[in-house]
Image (cartoon, helix red, strand yellow):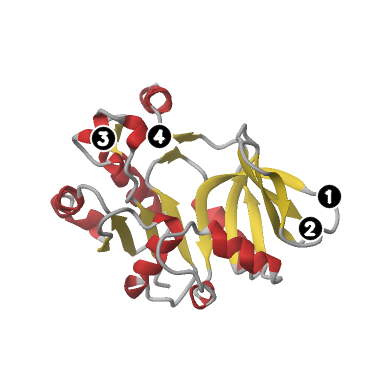
Amino acid sequence: MSRDAFILAAGLGTRLRPLTDEMPKCLVEVGGVPMLERTARRLIAAGADRLIINVCPFADEIERFIDDNNGFGVDVRVSREEGDPLETGGGLLAAREHLREEAPFLIHNADVFTDLDLGSLLEAHAASGALVTLAMMERPSTRGLLFDEGGLAGRANDDADGEVFVRSTAGPVRRLAFACAHVVSPAFLDSVTERGRFGIFVPYLRLAEAGARILPHRVDGCTWVDIGRPEQLAQANEIATG
């Protein structure tokens, strides 16, 4: 089966400056390997034969890196975003022309150093028939998602409005942190009414309110580091080289 994967690589990386004044965040190295390459090869190992990569700053440099690596041996499509990045939802919608929409596809951030099992994430999605399956874990986070026995039920933000539910809940509610990998059924794309610049959890929560099955898949215990800050980048390098 053909498998697409969308890599989110358009971030500005402002918290890593001055490093990202001279290079895109997705080409920052961990253990001597650029994060874009690490992410691409993990997705390919999970069965992806087409990668769609959204880019914004340093677009030429990123395309050159992809070409120098022969597209990592698969079909690579680049979706350029002009001006400011379109965020996760807007970026996916802008890249839709490159998606074959033949099967559920993976979405993965390029700035997360992790060994979470993408194969089990795909298997969980196929077994449940969900619209979206989210890799979730228990870890400290000021932001989280709220799940009940029916799936996504709300969000939590300790720095803003606390817990917000989008529908009535059934059974115990669990607060979990997103691990920045998800599997999306093609039908989701036709359900996106948002346009322009928006985060993908805007339609996820709207659809959950309407009864869509957006389910968690637990990846507790995996290695997971967001390299967005210098101290986190140092942590990822220590793990990779240790």
Amino acid identity at mark 3: Thr
Vertical side of 97 occupied by 216: above or below: above
Whichever of labels 1 and 2 marks the residue nearer the N terminus, that label is 2
Looking at the rendering, in which quadrant would you find the C terminus? top left
Q: Residue at x 59, y 62 (%)?
A: 204
Residue located beneath label 4 in the image: 228
C-beta proximity under 8 Å, tags 1 and 2:
yes
Give coordinates of residue 206: x percent, y percent.
Answer: 62, 66
C-beta proximity under 8 Å, tags 2 and 4:
no
Q: Residue at x 71, y 44 (%)?
A: 175
Whichever of labels 1 and 3 marks the residue nearer the N terminus, that label is 3
C-beta proximity under 8 Å, tags 4 and 1:
no
Q: Is residue 101 visible?
A: yes
> How far apart are labels 1 and 2 at the CA level?
7 Å
Vertical side of 128 occupied by 21: above or below: above
Amino acid identity at mark 4: Gly
Q: Secondary structure at mark 1?
A: loop
Whichever of labels 2 and 4 marks the residue nearer the N terminus, that label is 2
Q: Is residue 123 visible?
A: no
Vertical side of 76 occupied by 109: above or below: above
Residue located beneath label 2 in the image: 149
Q: Secondary structure at mark 2?
A: loop
Q: Secondary structure at mark 4?
A: loop
Give coordinates of residue 99: x percent, y percent.
Answer: 37, 72
Left or right of 38, for residue 135 = right
Residue located beneath label 1 in the image: 172
Viewer-side residue, 168 vs 134: 168
Left or right of 36, for residue 189 = right
Label 2: few (<14), some (14–19) or many (≥20) C-alpha neighbours in 10 Å: few
